[in-house]
């Protein structure tokens, strides 16, 4: 039987682009773990993607996951848009390249071994776990330590 895990994610960017960070809360039964990291120059969408990626990559075995995000970009991208992007060689319907393709490909790989329900919550609406992830992401954005090389290589 797969472990049932809850993952809550949020990304933040101080300016867009600008310094950014992500926050993740993982919950398995009564155990919780938080993760966060800040980047010198990135975008809000990249940080939303990174939060989901890091949350999933942290798990060491296949799990049944409920992943909650306040990003429609992430939720719709992974549940609706990605299939056609892949069919078109990571291009959108207008034939332009998919933004943040490095992270979408990484997320696509990260989901492959899990059974995931993707939930959306409205940001800044009092959802406790989302608010906690937002605090983690903003704190990380205010104290960046990493370079988002994917952003530097693939400016949107």
Image: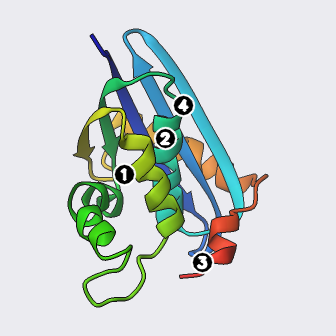
Res. 9 image quadrant: top left
Residue depth check, mark 2 versus mark 4: number of the one nearer the observer? 4
* Quadrant in the picture for the N terminus: top left
Residue at disc 1, secondary structure: loop
* Residue topped by disc 3: 154
Q: Is residue 30 above or below residue 48?
A: above
Mark 2 or 4 closer to N-term?
4
Q: Nearer the viewer, residue 75 or 126?
A: 75
Contact between labelled residues 1 and 4, with CB atoms less than 8 Å apart: no
Q: How far apart, in angstroms, are the residues tagged by discs 2 and 4? A: 16 Å
* Residue topped by disc 2: 133
Q: How far apart, in angstroms, are the residues tagged by discs 4 and 1? A: 26 Å
Residue 124, numbered circle? 1
Residue 43 visible in the snapshot: yes
Residue at disc 3, secondary structure: loop
Contact between labelled residues 4 and 2, with CB atoms less than 8 Å apart: no
Residue drawn 20% across the image and 61% down it: 80
* Residue topped by disc 4: 58
Residue 48 visible in the snapshot: no
Circle 2: is it few (<14), some (14-19), or many (20+) Cα within 10 Å? many
Residue 73, given in percent of the width and then of the height, sits at 33, 64
User: In the displayed structure, does residue 123 sit left or right of residue 139?
Assistant: left
Q: In this view, does 115 lie above or below 68?
A: above
Mark 2 or 1 closer to N-term?
1
Mark 2 or 3 closer to N-term?
2
Residue depth check, mark 4 versus mark 1: number of the one nearer the observer? 4
């Amino acid at each position: 039987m797969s472990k049932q895990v809850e993952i809550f994610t949020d990304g933040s960017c101080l300016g867009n682009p600008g310094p950014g960070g992500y926050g993740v809360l993982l919950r398995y039964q009564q155990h919780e773990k938080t993760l966060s990291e800040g980047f010198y120059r990135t975008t809000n969408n990249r940080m939303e993607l990174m939060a989901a990626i890091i949350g999933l990559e942290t798990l060491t075995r296949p799990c049944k996951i409920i992943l909650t995000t306040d990003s429609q970009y992430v939720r719709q991208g992974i549940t609706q848009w990605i299939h056609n992007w892949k069919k078109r060689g990571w291009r959108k319907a207008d034939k332009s390249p998919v933004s943040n393709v490095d992270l979408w490909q990484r997320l696509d790989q990260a989901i492959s071994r899990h059974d995931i329900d993707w939930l959306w919550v409205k940001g800044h609406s009092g959802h406790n776990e989302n608010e906690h992830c937002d605090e983690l992401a903003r704190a990380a954005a205010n104290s960046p330590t990493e370079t988002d090389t994917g952003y530097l290589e693939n400016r949107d």
